[in-house]
Image (cartoon, rainbow, N blue to C red):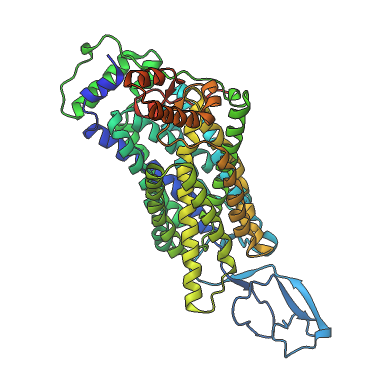
Amino acid sequence: MEYEKILTQIGGFGRAQLMVFLSLSMTSVKAVLDLQLLALMLHVSPFRCAQQNSSGYEPQGFDSHCTISRSSEAGNASSADPSLYSAGNMTEEACTEFEFENDFIRLTMVKDFQLVCARDIYPTILMSVYFFGDACGMLFATLGDRIGRRTILLVCGCVDIVTTVLPVFTPTVEWQIGARFLKGLASPVYYQGLLLVEELTAAKHRAMLGNLYWLLWCIGYSLCSLIAYLGQEWRIIQLISLAFSSSYILVYFLVPESPRWLVLKGRTKEAGRVFEKMARWNGIRWRTNKFDKIVIEETPTGRTLELFTYPIMRRKTLIIVFVMLVYSLAYYGLTIDTTFIIDDVYINTAVSGVLEIPAYLLAWQVSERIGRRTPTVAMSIVAGVAIIAVPFIPQEKQYLFAIKVAMALIGKCLLTAAYSAMDIYGAENFPTSLRNNGVFLSAVVAGFLSVISPVINYLSTVAEWLPAVVFGGLTIVSVLSVLWLPETKDMPLPDTVKDAEKFLNWRAEHEERERQVVDNFTEPEDLAASEMRRPRYGSIGVENGSGNEQQFPSV
């Protein structure tokens, strides 16, 4: 009996699948909390030197200066009041202690560990180390194909719980670096959660659940503002996020192992027991004696190196990897910039999260109605221009401030939409036999090089406009290479690398054939025959929609 028929017989999407979805969707929320709460905890507030002098003079305001001017004649007396001393008697001393403005979060990691001036590189290091751990975690997640989806989920869940608590008790920033790397390792587990949801649900419900799964990412993104507001101290904020790790308890009790994985490993009886249990939860009587053998159609897979064997496929692969890398750099760079849209970190984070929802809807609509290539290029160019413009718009007048906020919103929204559209478009350019390999390759490369996103943001210490110019400029330059990719909307997709080599010119050949049919009044039988002679192509929905196994690729 076919695997998909069994899923339909036991309910398709019933109470059992709903419980699985609700349990696993929390991993998506927890992943974005780990990222965005860390960015909020590393927010740098205005500061000043903590004065230690005998004059009793207290400076007015927080000037964020790293040195203090002292008079050589007055000993320890500070000359922050310039009326007291002459310029010739002044010396500059580095501040060793700082006071911070109580602006948003009362106690951030920056305030607690004094991560400013000579130590201002540490927030960048902490963020980069987290991204590096996240990229390594993607490689770790490939073990799910060997030891099981549920097993890797539970292992990562244990790592997540431990590494959520661990930073609270680390006494120094150096220990924090190690803790944040370990935290990053558990982050990609939400991909395994989505994969398990798809393997336990009938094909016709998967698109809906996939979209809802990522919708919860957006909700978690916005929720970070509320958590930071309620916590006010980074250790309390960290512990509040631990509540979302409790979903792994639900995973242990409610989420079964993937029957698909069990069948492919020869453990058919265990798969049958999983089906029986899910059918019982759905209120359906179903017994394993209804079938003798579960049939799963496997998509033939190749090796990643085959992507570079043929010239056209190599060019397409390099373009897709490069564009996805730039999107990842820009997206995460703007995401961890807690004041990109507006200086209020709470509003900035909440709005950024909500903004993801229309961005994904926009990507979906333009891809379906207009196409893949042109909308992706157009959205990226507009996004790049808007992002570059943001730091150059003054805020002295209210209408200029409104324009700046509007440009930031447009830039972030269209960048997210283009990134989402490129996810689909890039996958469609890979042949069926290497689609998982290509997507995985671009994701891993983008993941590892996202490490430099915080470094690019750090360039704001040199010039405030530099990060926006880098992110926006790279987005515009990289997306121009997309013009060398073929449009894939309403086009059959290639099965093999050799088919992909012909794919660039297939649309033109197809249109020419249609013109000849019209000109020569070709009979329907002739048209059908000509259609049968064209290269055999599959559909991107075959892997994700019909139930074929999604495995991480070999190199």
308 up-or-down from 289: above or below: below
Q: Position of residue 514 (x, y in %)?
A: 41, 29
Report whether 516 appears left or right of 115: left
Q: How many marks?
A: 0
Give whichever of 208, 77 is nearer the camera.
Answer: 208
Quadrant assignment for the N terminus:
top left
Q: Position of residue 321 (x, y in %)?
A: 58, 37
Residue drawn where x is 31% and y is 28% of the image:
200
Q: Residue furthest right?
A: 88
Residue 194: image quadrant is top left
Is residue 244 among the parts visible in the rendering? Answer: no
Is residue 373 among the parts visible in the rendering? Answer: yes
Report whether 66 appears left or right of 373: right
Residue drawn where x is 45% and y is 38% of the image:
424
Q: Position of residue 2 (x, y in %)?
A: 29, 16
71 up-or-down from 327: above or below: below
Residue 526: image quadrant is top left
Q: Residue furthest bottom?
A: 83
322 up-or-down from 331: above or below: above
Q: Position of residue 6 (x, y in %)?
A: 25, 20
Give whichever of 232, 392 is nearer the camera.
Answer: 392
Report whether 2 appears left or right of 114: left
Q: Residue furthest front?
A: 520
Give whichever of 58, 125 is nearer the camera.
Answer: 125
Quadrant assignment for the C terminus:
top right
